Image (cartoon, rainbow, N blue to C red):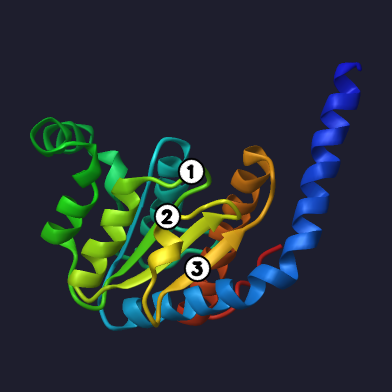
Amino acid sequence: MDYYEIIAENFQATIEAIAMSVDDLADAIEGASQLMAQALLEDRKIIACGNGVDATTAQLFATHLIDRFEQDRPALPALALGSDGAGLTAIARSGGLDDIFSRQLRALGQPGDVLLCCNSGSSERNLQRAVQAAHERSMGVVTLTNGDDVGPGSRGRAGDIEIRVDSPRRPRRLELHTMVIHSLCELLDHSLFGPFDGQ
């Protein structure tokens, strides 16, 4: 197999994964955007977390809210819990990796805030504890998960929203997670600031 064939197969697999996922994900994405928009309208914030590459997904979302997505608009309050290396290692050293997100949420989360918990891989106790801490703080919870996940999305409560991306390969899940993030950002901008007329 030559390189072109590998590249073409990857592009084709991504196109197919996107096409097969729209109907399954649209309602959950819409619901998540409405939950987040309501929180932002009430002067609350969005707090995102994830492990490893999923931390970059969480950071991408927070960056788009703080800076901008496609249009100039006021900054929106958001933060990614994985971006403070000193804080993470301090918590991990004293309490273990299971508490790196939940401890921060108990300090920073307020009732009415929304947690976005990203997980494209296997179940992680620190994400489960993050969801539990968000519930304790009366926060809304959106989980961006995968078809094999038995973690943060499986122990939800009424009002939690799970966006479950079902694809056998992790690269496809990550690509779809990025599309979900971009859809959420566009829907939030549309809800809060009106439609964007750019090309």
Q: Determine whether, in the image, residue 46 is placed left or right of residue 198.
A: left
The image quadrant where one finds the N terminus is top right
Q: Please name the amino acid that badge 2 sits on.
A: Gly
| Number of other residues with Cα within 10 Å of mark 3, as a class: few under 14, some 14 to 19, many 20 or more | many
Label 3 or label 2, whichever lies nearer to me, is 2
Q: What element carries label 2?
A: loop
> Could you tell me if the residues under marks 1 and 2 are in contact, i.e. CB atoms within 8 Å?
yes
Q: How crowded is mark 2: few (under 14 residues within 10 Å), some or many (20 or more)?
A: many
- Residue furthest to the left in view is 94
Could you say which disc has been placed on residue 107 in the image?
A: none
Camera-nearest label, 1 or 3? 1
**Label of residue 151 in the image:** 2
- Looking at the image, do the residues carrying marks 3 and 2 touch, with CB atoms under 8 Å apart? no
The amino acid at mark 1 is Ser
The C terminus sits in image quarter? bottom right
Q: What residue type is labelled 3?
A: Glu
User: Where residue 38 sits: x, y (%)?
Assistant: 38, 83
CA separation in Å, label 1 and label 3: 16 Å
Which residue position is annotated with label 1? 122
> Which of the 4 image quadrants contains residue 86?
top left
> Residue 162 has which mark?
3
Residue at the image point whose x is 18% and y is 31% from the top: 89
